[in-house]
Image (tube, rainbow, N blue to C red):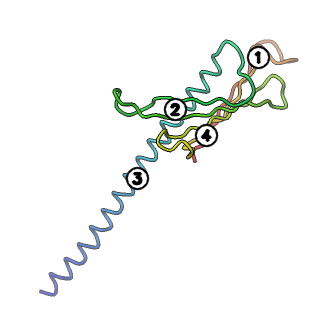
Amino acid sequence: MIEVLVALAVLAVGMIAVLGTAGSSTRLGGQLRDDTLANWVGMNELTALRIAPSLPDLGSTEGDADMGGDPSNPEQWHWKATVSGTPDPDLLRVDIDVSNGRSPKDVVTSVTGFIGKPGPPAGAPAGIGGAAATQAVCR
């Protein structure tokens, strides 16, 4: 009888470990999903600034975007883009912070990119176009 109780105790400890791991995986999966969707929102906003017919003004703008969820009830995301100058007069820096609409003060991810003025930079050889680079940072 004692052997059965010991076996059940070992089984219970093993089951607790399995359930803990499953719960952790579920939380991490949700966090990864949110990080991915927030990154897509930031990249979409950066792309919209890049393909605009004119360069964005310096300063901050904010907005909301739908991404993920059920098409009839999409998830809301809030973004804030800050456009600033760089030492290179032909290059602008864009920092975009993205947060979930449920908690707009908690930034999920930040996307940083650069927008070059159209055409080659001053003094560049022929065939060199405007500069553009992107970096995404998940917090």
Residue 61, horizontal then vertical, whole percent:
65, 29
Pointer 4 and pointer 2: residues touching (CB < 8 Å)? no
- Which image quarter: residue 126? top right
Lateral position of residue 76 relative to residue 6, left or right:
right
The residue labelled by disc 2 is 40
**First in sequence: mark 3 vs mark 4:** 3
Mark 1 to mark 3 CA distance (whole Å): 46 Å
**Residue type for callout 3:** Arg
Image location (x, y in percent) of residue 90: 81, 22
Residue placed under numbered mark 1 in the picture: 128
Secondary structure found at label 4: strand
Reading the image, the residue beneath label 4 is: 110
Q: Is residue 33 above or below residue 53?
A: below
| Disc 1/disc 4 C-alpha distance (Å) | 29 Å
Q: Earlier in the sequence, mark 2 or mark 1?
A: 2
Mark 1 or mark 4, which is nearer to you? Answer: 4
